[in-house]
Amino acid sequence: MQASNDIRKKYEIYLRLERGLSPNSIEAYLADLDKLLSFGVDEGKSYKEITYEDLQQFIAQLADIGIHPRSQARIISGIKSFYRFLLLDDYIECDPTELLESPKIGLKLPEVLTVNEINAILDSIDLSTPEGHRNRAMLETLYSCGLRVSELINLRYADIYPEEQFIRVLGKGNKQRLVPISEIALQEINNYLKDRSQVVPKKGFEDTLFLSRRGTALSRIMVFHIIKVQTAAAGIHKTVSPHTFRHSFATHLLEGGANLRAIQEMLGHEQITTTQIYTHIDRTFLRQEILAHHPRYKIQVMREP
């Protein structure tokens, strides 16, 4: 770890003095380096030991959590710059990034919402309507937990653990995972429960968290429609879907410096390579990662005495 800190400081000096970069550019380059160094720690390798194959795995992980090709290309550019510095200063003899290619940028991926845009969508919800608190709780949960729309509509009241600040999610292939949930989302759910008690659930939906007016689970189409209406009400001119919230969750965590494997775990993704031994990330670590790097949880930490 000390060796990584030392080389980081030397690289920062190189960027400032030899390349004459602005403070903002230097910060961006160092943030990209930190992602790589964190990946190296997970793989049990120092920056000198990382190979071309390791870097391919690193980029595959970025793609797996939905990072846009443009962002991937920027991160690759930052890593290439770091290894050029190592080569110039004789820390390494060959550059593992030499053959590393940036992803094709032409691919159309979901939009990413800024934190302000997400807040604007949530604030556009009319809480005086019967569905207002439900919709706000639903979208806050979608963003705070990075859920798939199918996971959101199938969420049950029994899946919420407010004391532990976790929710249990049933993902693809009926695989369960535990995901941290923010105090803000828990508060919105609590606000909604007063309105939910006015709806009579139909048989089989007694424990469904987000109920329609008919007392059944919401459909995927209904969630899409709610998001479309609120995005327009917020004056945001982007194509926004439930997946946009999930995509924004992953992007904001990565930009905040969260561990790639932790993001994969929270999204419910499988590891990229079958040969790689699955590393279990415990709940404490997941919670630490999300508290430190997700915008919603940063607000929560600031409020805590």
Image (spheres, rainbow, N blue to C red):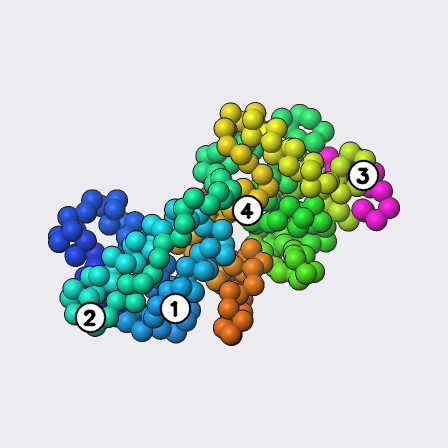
Q: Nearer the viewer, residue 285 or 37?
A: 37
Q: Which residue is mark 1?
A: 54
Q: Quadrant of residue 245?
A: top right
Would residue 157 be visible to someone looking at this image? no
Q: Which residue is mark 4?
A: 246
Label 2, label 1: how many angstroms apart (C-alpha)?
18 Å
Q: Secondary structure at mark 2?
A: loop
Q: Earlier in the sequence, mark 3 or mark 1?
A: 1
In the picture of the structure, the residue carrying the numbered disc 2 is 91
Q: CA distance from mark 3 to mark 1?
A: 50 Å
User: Which stretch is magenta?
Assistant: 195-206
Disc number for residue 215: 3
Amino acid at circle 3? Gly
Q: Residue at x 77, y 49 (%)?
A: 207
Residue 203 falls within the magenta-colored stretch: yes
**Residue at 28% across / 63% down in the picture?**
98
In this rendering, the label closer to the viewer, 2 or 1: 1
- Contact between marks 2 and 1 (CB within 8 A): the answer is no
Q: Relative to residue 84, is residue 132 depicted above or below?
A: above
Q: Position of residue 160 (x, y in %)?
A: 67, 52
Q: Are marks 4 and 1 in contact (CB under 8 Å)?
A: no
Crowding at label 1, few (<14), some or many (≥20) Cα neighbours within 10 Å? some
Q: Which of the two discs, 4 and 1, labels the residue nearer the N terminus?
A: 1
Quick one: label 2 or label 1, which is nearer the N terminus? 1
Residue 26 at x, y = what percent? 24, 50
